[in-house]
Image (cartoon, grey):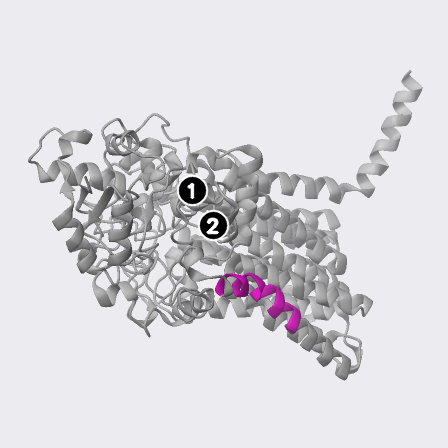
């Protein structure tokens, strides 16, 4: 028995030595999935706009194929189908639960983490691959996007698979791999449209320069690949646009009921330059605006949250007079003296009733309390605006992304999401770059060039694009992770081998990166007591061990120094990512990571789930219950203009609540004559008229409703005063997110 046991133990040690990287990768993957999925119930159903679409899509194949927002199939969502199809399939398998819709993104985030290891380790070794995977897993923007029912992490995973196929095609000199890479880019287009094409500069340049084939064959293969990309990308688009428009949902957020216009307009040019050449559709018409964008007089979004998908807003609720989204800047007067401390689990039994008070004292920054999550106060040197004050390029209002410019990513609202290691990445590029001999190009050089081009392309786009949400920044993460994983190993080797000036890059990069991180973290007073000292101590420990290695040439000292360096540079990203796990998002439609989440959980009395219907009390549920009670099979539950009016009704009931104006309230899916016809047929009984309509609000149609339908007394669905407009607005605004709304009934 003892002999057998000793034999097993002796065999175990060599196995661990030989396959240690497998266990390390499993640990990193487990950490990634834990961050992506732990306590996911706090997010509920996530973005209500997409959650409503998933519920609608599971009710019929037609709704599924055309990604209909509502069960009635009147308007589609403003995104391509693939990611939503995947979410719908998960719901069909596991049931309609929030976690079932969020699971595909969590898996995609962890899958992308593993792909980073595969892509880097093959050409630069296992340590480089593991560092890349770890950096990717701890990027706050990645964690935030992985805990959301938007599509970005599914897109990142598909693009990384395409990258692997590209490298394989160059290595094997086989066109089929390149064509498969093109196929996956086409799939990426069907996840997030033109965003998938952002890797084409890296993919195209690396293939044309580093492929071993003759230049004529490279050009021909590239041309065929572009054809494949186009065919796969536009297959669903053409199918929808050729289908009789009267027999399918109206294409949401398009101006002419075509997916092609949606691609070019709302999801294309308007993202880069802003709507209408710098003026949003909503702003031109005084009816709100882009997702996450304020409208005139604060009509752009819910309280300090912007008008993002699934969220409404009310006049005067925005944090600034022009409707810019200004989340409260926490201070000690609001009871946030401890904001920014290591996270503790929020009170799961609290409620949302204090949310309306959150902005009272939020317009100034107290240096003794929580710093703003933005560049509004941080921007003293023109480094871009921030979460409350920075305007978008092109004249749009703030969306937490600051002002377009070369230094936008350094604004405090964006730094915490993605920029932690950007300075280090620059050092890594210097460390890993080699002289290129055109006749002796290697795939290893091509791989490194690919990640550099990816990083540069993404940074340029997100520095100058007019509109995006902060979680979109996860697109930069593979570039940073790839370059940093490669570069740190190269800097360690240069330091060990004393290679000229490059031997000093390791300690210098550590000093500069730590200093920049400390400057940023110092804005959060409570973090000065533990996170700043942690960064300082681990930095000093790493530098001391580097000196020991220089004096005694001890390999173990250099290995330990690298470990302390990783702890130092990743402590900030780790904590920021942890806040996204431990605390409910301030706004599930525009999520971000940061210590502000902890303070807002305490001051706003948030529950783990902020979706109005999920946390609603009996009063706020009264109108929904009233509509369900009076629902007639074969009719619409209620009709309104904007998607955020009815998204929660669809999520809760699965009944055909209709938003004829789509997400922006601008879609022309319903005309006055069609309205009259539907009323006559008995399909429309209840009609919600809200003060915040949308672009191209059909005043003629709304006038018809007011003249021909009966205004429902609020006392019939839970109100206490039949003549109290305040009560009416209070109930309906809490349920529908509107500043002022009225329910009408066609008898």
Give whichever of 656, 465 is nearer the camera: 656
**Residue 478 drawn in magenta:** no
Q: Quadrant of residue 667?
A: bottom left
Q: Nearer the viewer, residue 404 or 310?
A: 310
Relative height, residue 219 to residue 445 (above, below): below
Which stretch is magenta?
227-241
Of all residues shown, which one is farthest toward the top? 1
Name the residue: 46% across, 61% down. 244
| Of residues 62 and 531, the one drawn nearer to the viewer in this rendering | 62
Q: Secondary structure at mark 1?
A: loop
As drawn, the label of residue 150 is 2
Q: Position of residue 534 (x, y in %)?
A: 49, 43
Q: Which mark is residue 46?
A: 1
Mark 1 and mark 2 in contact? Answer it, CB < 8 Å.
yes
| Outermost residue to the right | 3
Percent position of residue 678, x then y = 29, 49
Q: Position of residue 1 (x, y in %)?
A: 91, 15
């Amino acid at each position: 028995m003892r002999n057998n046991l000793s034999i097993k133990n002796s065999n175990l040690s060599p196995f661990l030595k030989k396959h240690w990287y497998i266990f390390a990768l499993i640990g990193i993957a487990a950490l990634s999935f834990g961050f992506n999925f732990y306590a996911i119930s706090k997010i509920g159903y996530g973005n209500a706009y997409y959650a409503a679409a998933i519920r609608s899509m599971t009710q019929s194949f037609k709704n599924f194929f055309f990604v209909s927002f509502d069960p009635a199939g009147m308007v589609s969502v403003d995104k391509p189908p693939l990611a939503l199809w995947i979410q719908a399939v998960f719901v069909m398998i596991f049931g309609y639960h929030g976690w079932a819709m969020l699971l595909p993104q969590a898996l995609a985030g962890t899958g992308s983490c593993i792909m980073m290891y595969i892509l880097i380790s093959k050409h630069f070794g296992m340590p480089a691959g593991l560092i890349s995977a770890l950096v990717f897993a701890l990027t706050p923007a990645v964690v935030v996007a992985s805990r959301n029912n938007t599509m970005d992490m599914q897109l990142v995973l598909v693009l990384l698979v395409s990258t692997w196929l590209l490298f394989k095609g160059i290595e094997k000199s086989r066109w089929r791999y390149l064509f498969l890479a093109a196929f996956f880019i086409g799939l990426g287009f069907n996840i997030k449209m033109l965003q998938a094409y952002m890797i084409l500069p890296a993919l195209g340049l690396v293939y044309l320069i580093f492929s071993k084939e003759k230049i004529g064959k490279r050009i021909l293969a590239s041309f065929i690949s572009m054809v494949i990309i186009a065919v796969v990308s536009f297959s669903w688009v053409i199918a929808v646009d050729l289908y009789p428009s009267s027999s399918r949902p109206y294409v949401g957020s398009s101006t002419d009921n075509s997916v092609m216009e949606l691609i070019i307009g709302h999801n294309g040019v308007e993202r880069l330059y802003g709507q209408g050449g710098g003026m949003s559709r909503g702003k031109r018409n005084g009816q709100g605006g882009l997702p996450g964008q304020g409208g005139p007089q604060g009509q752009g979004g819910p309280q300090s949250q912007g008008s993002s998908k699934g969220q409404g807003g009310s006049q005067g609720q925005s944090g600034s007079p022009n409707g810019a989204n200004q989340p409260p800047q926490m201070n000690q007067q609001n009871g946030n003296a401890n904001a920014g401390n290591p996270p503790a689990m929020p009170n799961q039994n609290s409620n949302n009733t204090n949310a309306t008070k959150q902005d009272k004292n939020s317009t100034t920054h107290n240096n003794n309390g929580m710093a703003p999550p933005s560049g509004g106060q941080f921007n003293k040197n023109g480094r871009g605006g921030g979460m409350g004050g920075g305007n978008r390029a092109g004249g749009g209002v703030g969306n937490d992304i600051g002002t377009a410019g070369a230094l936008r990513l350094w604004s405090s609202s964006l730094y915490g999401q993605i920029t932690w290691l950007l300075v280090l990445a620059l050092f890594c590029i210097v460390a890993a770059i080699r002289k290129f001999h055109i006749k002796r190009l290697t795939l290893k050089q091509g791989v490194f060039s690919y990640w550099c081009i990816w990083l540069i392309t993404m940074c340029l786009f997100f520095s100058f694009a007019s509109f995006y949400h902060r979680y979109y920044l996860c697109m930069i993460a593979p570039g940073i992770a790839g370059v940093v994983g490669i570069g740190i190993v190269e800097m360690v080797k240069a330091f060990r081998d004393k290679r000229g000036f490059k031997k000093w890059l390791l300690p210098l990069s550590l000093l500069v990166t730590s200093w920049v991180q400390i400057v940023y973290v110092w804005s959060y007073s409570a973090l000065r007591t533990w996170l700043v000292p942690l960064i300082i101590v681990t930095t000093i420990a790493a530098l001391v061990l580097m000196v020991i290695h220089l004096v005694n040439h001890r390999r173990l000292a250099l290995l330990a120094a690298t470990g302390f360096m990783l702890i130092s540079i990743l402590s900030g990203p780790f904590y920021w990512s942890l806040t996204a796990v431990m605390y409910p998002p301030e706004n599930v439609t525009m999520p971000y990571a940061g210590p502000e989440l902890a303070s807002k959980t305490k001051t706003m009395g948030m529950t783990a789930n902020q979706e109005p219907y999920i946390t609603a009390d009996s009063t706020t549920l009264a109108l929904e219950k009233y509509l369900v009670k009076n629902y007639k099979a074969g009719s619409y539950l209620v009709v309104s203009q904007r998607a955020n009016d009815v998204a929660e009704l669809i999520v809760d009931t699965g009944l055909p609540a209709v938003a004829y104006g789509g997400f922006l309230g601008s879609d022309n899916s319903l005309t006055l004559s069609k309205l009259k016809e539907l009323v006559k047929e008995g399909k429309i009984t209840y009609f919600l008229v809200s003060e915040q309509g949308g672009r191209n609000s059909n005043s003629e149609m709304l006038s018809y409703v007011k003249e021909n339908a009966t205004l429902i007394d609020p006392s019939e669905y839970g109100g206490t005063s039949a003549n109290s407009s305040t009560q009416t607005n209070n109930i309906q605004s809490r349920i529908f997110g509107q500043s002022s709304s009225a329910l009408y009934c066609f008898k």
